[in-house]
Image (tube, helix red, strand yellow):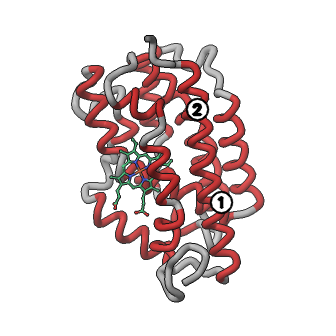
Amino acid sequence: MDATGTPPGTPFSTLIRVASHEQHTEAETSAFMSNMLGGRLGVRAYARYTEQLWFVYRALEEGAQLLREDPVAGPFIRPELMRTAELERDLAHLRGPDWRTGLAPLPATAAYAARVAQCARDWPAGYVAHHYTRYLGDLSGGQIIRDKAERTWGFARKGDGVRFYVFERIPNPSAFKRGYRELLDAVDVDDLEKQRIVDECKRAFEYNGAVFRELGAEFPLSA
Ligand code: HEM
């Protein structure tokens, strides 16, 4: 066993999942997420959350353009994952055609997006950690979030407002995730670098947690 409690030879995809498991539970059960998905917050909170995602995915997907040919990060860059256009349609629905006017990230979101951009520029393996944390999550729990959002705020099923969660070009998310885990297992870096990727994944979860905390402060439950 090593520090993650997994035996030597554990596939990297398992290692990164196990290492981030605790933080995943924290993210799922954060006050903002549970209040939002428990139907206790208005659509304005959902819109504010979606705005934050736009800043994060813009950094992820501008980074993707830089890394297409990169030996480590390149294989992860897939057009069917890209979310910026979907987020922009959702924001046009949520905020109106002038959605961009006055749109500003929360401080935690700005820090998160800056870290993603920095990894994309200087450290492709670190970028992989951010890519994994968001896209594999969107393909998994994202579907639960979509379902709750549709029911709570009355968005059309898979329509405007929740397009971010709809991967039109990934008809079989389970199969896609299997392929993604194979890519993780094949990442061609040494064990030390793999550990650094795991650490960056934990950092990515921390960034998400910080965004949730700031959203929670902006949208407390009124007594
Ligand atoms: C209420 C919110 C959330 C729910 C309900 C949720 C739910 C889930 C579920 C059901 C899975 C599938 C587990 C499996 O396939 O075995 C999953 C996987 C995942 N989630 Fe979440 N999640 C939430 C929030 C988040 C957040 C905020 C992040 C990070 C930003 C995240 C990142 C991930 C990742 C990376 C995976 C893939 C784990 C792996 O198989 O390697 N999730 N989530």
Query: What is the three-letter code of the residue carrying label 1?
Result: Glu
15 or 113, which lies in front?
A: 15
- Numbered tag placed on residue 4 in the rendering: none
Callout count: 2
Mark nearer the viewer, 1 or 2: 2
Q: Which of 76 and 203 is in front in this view?
A: 203
Where is the C terminus found, in terms of image quarters? top left
Q: What element carries label 1?
A: helix
- The tag earlier along the polypeptide, 1 or 2, is 1
Q: How far from the left and from the top, in percent, is residue 191?
A: 65, 82
Instruction: Name the residue at 63% across, 44% down.
Output: 207
Residue at x 43%, y 76% (from the top left corner): 182
In the rendered view, would you say 49 is above or below 206?
Answer: above
Tell me, yes or no, if residue 45 can be seen here: yes
Residue lying at 42% horizontally and 36% vertically, measured from the top left: 86
Asked whether, in this view, residue 161 is left or right of residue 123, the answer is: left
Residue found at the very far top of the displayed protein: 223
Circles 1 and 2 in contact, beta carbons < 8 Å: no
Quadrant in the rendering for residue 170: bottom left
Q: Mark 2 points at which residue?
A: 213
Residue closer to the observer: 62 or 107:
107
Image side of residue 61 versus residue 176, left or right: right
Residue type beneath disc 2: Arg
Question: Where residue 23 sits: x, y (%)?
Answer: 52, 53
**Vertical placement of 102 versus 19: above or below?**
above
Q: Where is residue 128 in the image (x, y as percent from the top left)?
A: 59, 62
Can residue 96 be seen in the rendering of this structure? no
**In the image, the residue with mark 2 has its CB under 8 Å from the nearest atom of ligand 1:** no
Residue identified by numbered label 1: 200
- The quarter of the image holding the N terminus is bottom right
Q: Is residue 79 left or right of residue 2?
A: left
Residue placed farthest to the bottom in the image? 9
